[in-house]
Amino acid sequence: MGGGATELTGPDLAAGVAFDELTEGTPLLGHAGGEAVVVVRVGEDVHAIGASCTHYGGPLAQGLVVGHTIRCPWHHACFDLKTGEAIGAPALPDNACYEVARAGALVQVRTKKDAPKRKAPKSAPKAIVVVGAGAAGAACVEMLRKQGYGGKITMIGAEEPGPVDRPNLSKDYLAGTAPEEWIPLGSRERYTELKVDLIPSTPVTSIDVAAKKVTLEGGRSVAYDALLLATGAEPSRLPIEGGTLPHVHTLRSLADSRGIIENAKTAKRAVVVGASFIGLEVAASLVARGLEVHVVGPEPVPLARALGEALGAHVQKLHESKGVKFHLGTTPKAITATAVLLAKGDPIEADLVVLGVGVKPRVALAEAAGLKVDNGVVVDDHLRTSAPGIWAAGDIARYPDPRVGEHVRIEHWVVAERQGQHVARAMLGSDAPYHDAPFFWSVHYDMTISYVGHAPGYDSVEVFGSIDANDAAVAFRKNGKTLAVATLNRDKLSLSVDAAMARNDLPGVDAVLPVSRRSSLGFM
């Protein structure tokens, strides 16, 4: 979805290029058979793969090669160079992969390879149930079928239409620059093709751990041999007068985004409560729709807790340059049909209000089933819960992060997808621990922030480059360890940090950061 066809540039790879002209681990963009292709030399091997990421069409020629994989510079999707398989979210569809022939010193790209055919082990569970039709669930069922699983899969969700591209709900779709057909993470036809019984808009009411079955609203029960619990999170509402008025919205589902869009058609002034990532993305999208936008938040600098004061102030300045008005150091005390009343400051007239004040993990099912719950569903490093045969992934999963050295719960969309993929492999017998580095991106007008890692309480911040010039990396450290890095227009660096963190190589993170630097310290 998104993106578009890559323009055919570079050499005709079908005609061939000299092997000696290929630089180890550096993608070469060319074309073959009328399609854009990148070739990559890894040792004596040469691989050829489609030049566009299957997520949003990102340019893989600008990506990072790690072993026999290539990673997209935009959103860090990862593909197997040998097969074209999408092995790391957010890409779910596989990429085209091509036969490569060596004729003397010449390397030629030939026909497309067939998709690899795998067969799940005989010990695989006969029936798998996924509770939660979101990012983790969608990624899990896709990976199960890629791994050759032929058993019964049932995916149950609480809302229509099933899995959706949630980041787009606050970004391009809300701004009116992405069509709705981009939003589903697979059509109904796709899930029929995968032989997945998708049951949307039907909440699960209970899990019977002993009998290995779930009960749905209405009384139907579904048996499982393996279960993924991926119920996600629900947006918080403020316990204030007027917090549930018709023009007051939260944003989590496609229906929520549609509701904001419909309200925005007649609204003139919007108030976004919460200077969070989602709150500021909503602000930018409503500006794109021509509304006057005000943002209310208790902090003195937006996003400073996550990004540090320098980068947070830069984001605020960008929004202000687009006309957004900030009301910081205060909170709403009431909402009326025409205004938001503040604890400190004058009332703000508003005919549209969006709350971006955080989310709460949906753990009621897990608690009722007797699973261990502590600020999320507690899992081990394989994402297994305290009950046999049950895994958890996504916003509800509280898992051990080897870099932070404690259990964490990460509310990032890509994390949910990668955990769903990991669970699929684990259900089929993989004993590899989950070690992917958390990653998210946040879009503000024409500026994208990429963030790798997790720094729940950093004690210093170091800036490399120029934030003002939108060309920077910002490292967040605790006790001298770099736990996270945010970047502006340094995609290759972000990928290198991601690769090092996935290896749990924190010294390797510092090794890829620039030598020349400007330091600024901030304390939490």
Image: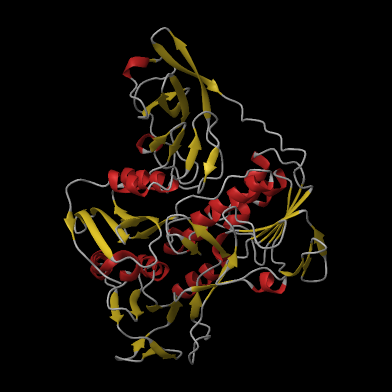
Residue closest to the far top: 104
Q: Nearer the viewer, residue 486 or 442?
A: 486
Q: Quadrant of the C terminus?
A: bottom left
Q: Residue at x 66, y 74 (%)?
A: 364
Vertical side of 19 occupied by 90: above or below? below
Q: Which of the 4 quarters of the picture holds residue 448?
A: bottom left
Q: Which percent across, then down, holds residue 394? A: 56, 60
Q: Which of the 4 quarters of the picture holds residue 9?
A: top left
- Please tell me how many numbered marks the rendered image carries: 0
Q: Which percent across, then down, holds residue 483? A: 36, 57
Confirm whether residue 98 shows in the render. yes
Q: Which of the 4 quarters of the picture holds residue 170?
A: bottom left
Vertical side of 456 occupied by 388: above or below? above
Q: Residue at x 77, y 53 (%)?
A: 225
- In the image, taking residue 333 as reference, residue 211 lies left or right, namely right
Q: Which percent across, then down, holds residue 434? A: 54, 50
Q: By what rule are the colours in the image chosen?
A: secondary structure
Vertical side of 484 occupied by 63: above or below? above
Q: Nearer the viewer, residue 46 or 456?
A: 456
Q: Which percent across, then down, holds residue 253? A: 56, 67
Confirm whether residue 139 shows in the render. no
Q: Residue at x 25, y 71 (%)?
A: 320
- In the image, taking residue 238 as reference, residue 380 lies left or right, namely right
